[in-house]
Amino acid sequence: MNAKLMSITVPVLIFLATVIVGSYIVFYSLNLDSKKFEEVKETPKEALVMGVNTEAKEVIDTSNATPVCESFTKFSNGEEDESEFSFEVIAYETDSIDSIEKVKFSILNATTNESVKEYMCNMADQKKVAEDGSKCLNSINKKDSTEKVKSVLSGVVFPSSGDYFIKAVVESSDGTFSKCVVTKNNE
C-alpha cells in the first residue's frame, strides 16, 4: 500500500474500532443497570445500598393535595310542610401547609343546571347571617396535624316554583377544592 492511502486508512480503522468498542460498553452497562432496576422492583420493601440492606420508604407528596369532603347532609326540622332546610358539610385538609378557607353552597336549577343562589361560608367567620335570613355556622376542630371543619348552612328556602338542588364545594387556601356529595338525607 502506498503511504498516502495508509495514512488515511489507519485513523479511519482506529475511529471505527473506538466507536464499536465504546458502543458495546455503553449498551452493556445500560443492560446491567436495567437488570439491577428489575431486581429492586421485585423487592420494594428492601434494597441493597452499598452492601447494606435498607428498608424502602414511600414518600407521599402532600403539596397541593385537595381537601376531603367527608360528609354532606341535608336535614329539616322534621315537619312535612317545613320549607326551610339546613345543610351540613364536614371536611378536612390533607395538605399540612394549607387550611380550608370556605365552603360554597349553590342552589342549582335542576333543568338548566345554573346557579340561582350562592352562599359563601368563610371559616374566618364563625357565624354569618345572609340577606335572606339564612345562617352560616362554622367550627374548626384541630387534632394532631389534621384540621376538621364543620360548616352548617341553615334556614335555606328554595324558590317556590321549579325543581332545585344544592351543591357544596370545600375550598382550600391554596386554591384546590373538593366537591361534596350528599351522603345522608334526614327528612
Image: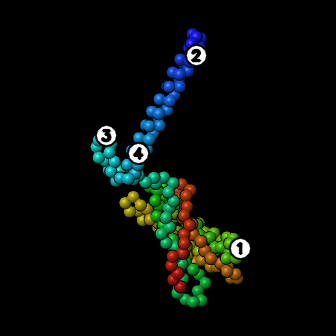
The reply, left or right, for residue 48 in relation to residue 136 is: left
Q: Position of residue 3 (x, y in %)?
A: 57, 10
Q: Earlier in the sequence, mark 3 or mark 4?
A: 4
Which residue corresponds to mark 4? 35
Picture layout, residue 125 above or below residue 132: above
Query: Which quadrant of the figure contains the N terminus?
Result: top right
Q: Nearer the viewer, residue 65 or 40?
A: 40
Q: Residues within 10 Å of mark 4 (few under 14, many from 20)?
A: few
First along the sequence among labels 1 and 2: 2
- Crowding near the residue tagged with mark 1, few <14, some 14–19, many ≥20 C-alpha atoms within 10 Å: few
Q: Which residue is mark 2?
A: 8
Q: Give the alpha-carbon distance from disc 3 to disc 2, as whole Å.
A: 48 Å
Q: Secondary structure at mark 2?
A: helix
Three-letter amino acid code at the position of disc 4:
Lys
Precedes in sequence: disc 4 or disc 1: 4
Q: Would you name the residue on which mark 3 appears?
A: 50
Inter-mark Cα distance, 1 to 2: 81 Å
Instruction: Kindly identify the amino acid type of the residue bearing the numbered disc 1.
Output: Thr
Whether the residues at callouts 2 and 4 have beta carbons within 8 Å, the answer is no
Q: Which label sits in the foreground, 3 or 2?
A: 2
Residue at horizontal 31%, vertical 40%? 50
Q: CA distance from mark 3 to mark 4?
A: 17 Å
Residue 112 marker: 1
Q: Nearer the viewer, residue 44 or 86?
A: 44
Q: Looking at the image, how many numbered discs can be counted on the residues?
A: 4
Residue visible at 47% across and 29% down in the picture: 21
